[in-house]
Amino acid sequence: MSSLALALVLVAALCHALWNLAAKRVDTGGYAFVWSYDLASVVLWAPPAGLVLLTSGHALSPALVLAPLVSGLLHIAYQLTLQTGYARADLGVVYPVARGVGPVLSMAVAILVLGERPGWAAGIGALVVIAGIVVVATGGAASGRHGVRAGLLWGGATGLAIAAYTLWDSWAVTALAQPPVPYFVMSCLWQVVLMTPTLLRRHRAALPAVWRARWREIAVVAVLSPLAYVLVLEAMRTAPVSLVAPARESSIVVGSLLAWWLFKEPDPLRRLLGAVIVLGGIALIAV
């Protein structure tokens, strides 16, 4: 992995940890919250996406419309599963499990199906990253063993969705050569369109309260979530997904430690040990 690709992934990891902290603060009205930040993401990121299309020579092709549709469906599953997990379990359990399961599955498919062959040092580094995530994820939870079980369940389900959209989006920006910013905006637009009927039927009443009480969280996620993923998509254009997927999980370092600091979640020493192991894996990936 090049130095530029690694830098993009690490900045993305920081943005990702910060927006997940904002999402954790929202414990009610999860569907309305997800719909709201997807809509805000479209509004905020549509101008840059249009500028990219105008200056890069890309057109609004069928691929740029249909490939994000699949991505949008996968991201809806990811976002709603993640938000449900945060409402029912500790961030310090859900987040590392989700970020651990995702790269394990992504790397396995990338190697077995896509034929990618990372170097031995990078391969060992990826395994070290996964081991660090396991250390962080196997600590205690504020809500006891029930909270740990809930975190493992929802984190695992979220990780499955992460693996699915990571592999699809990697294929879209490489094999289909889709520009990352317009691609992501189209995906967010599809998410808004697909979620709106259910929102109007079942969650319309929650919108005013969510907008009034959680506008700061909506803004944080709308800015940092697209920024984090666009940086990852850019990295995927020059580095194999089997390396990008584990490296982006350095967000677990920031996320787990901030979860302890801000939400007073348990096992700070275990979290720190896991963070050090993850950083060691990142160093090997960068070799």
Image: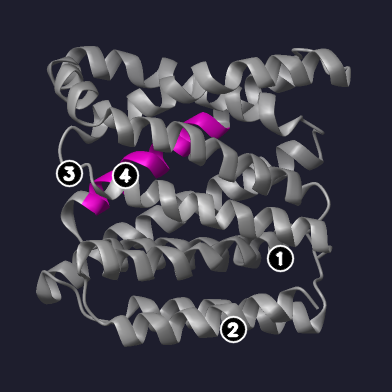
Q: Quadrant of the N terminus?
A: bottom right
| In this rendering, position of residue 65 left or right of residue 87 | right
Q: Is residue 84 magenta?
A: yes
SS of the residue at dot 4? helix
Mark closer to the chain start, 1 or 4: 4
Q: Which residue position is annotated with label 2?
A: 128
Mark 1 burial class by Cα count in 10 Å: few <14, some 14-19, many 20+: many
Q: Which residue position is annotated with label 4?
A: 23
**Residue 259 placed where, x, y %?**
30, 64
Query: How much space separates mark 3 and mark 1, taking CA atoms?
Result: 33 Å
Q: Are marks 1 and 4 in contact (CB under 8 Å)?
A: no
Q: Which residue position is annotated with label 3?
A: 27
Mark closer to the chain start, 3 or 2: 3
Disc 4 residue type (three-letter) = Ala
**Residue 39 placed where, x, y %?**
42, 20
Q: Which residue position is annotated with label 1?
A: 243
| Magenta-tinted stretch | 71-86
Can residue 113 be seen? no
Q: Report the mark closest to the observer, 3 or 1.
A: 3
Q: Report the mark closest to the observer, 3 or 2.
A: 3
Toward which corner of the image does residue 7 lie, by quadrant?
A: bottom right
Q: How is the image coloured?
A: one colour
Disc 3 residue type (three-letter) = Asp
Toward which corner of the image does residue 250 lie, by quadrant?
A: bottom right
Query: How much space separates mark 4 and mark 3, taking CA atoms?
Result: 8 Å
Q: Residue at x 70, y 64 (%)?
A: 242
Can residue 239 be seen? yes
Mark closer to the chain start, 2 or 1: 2
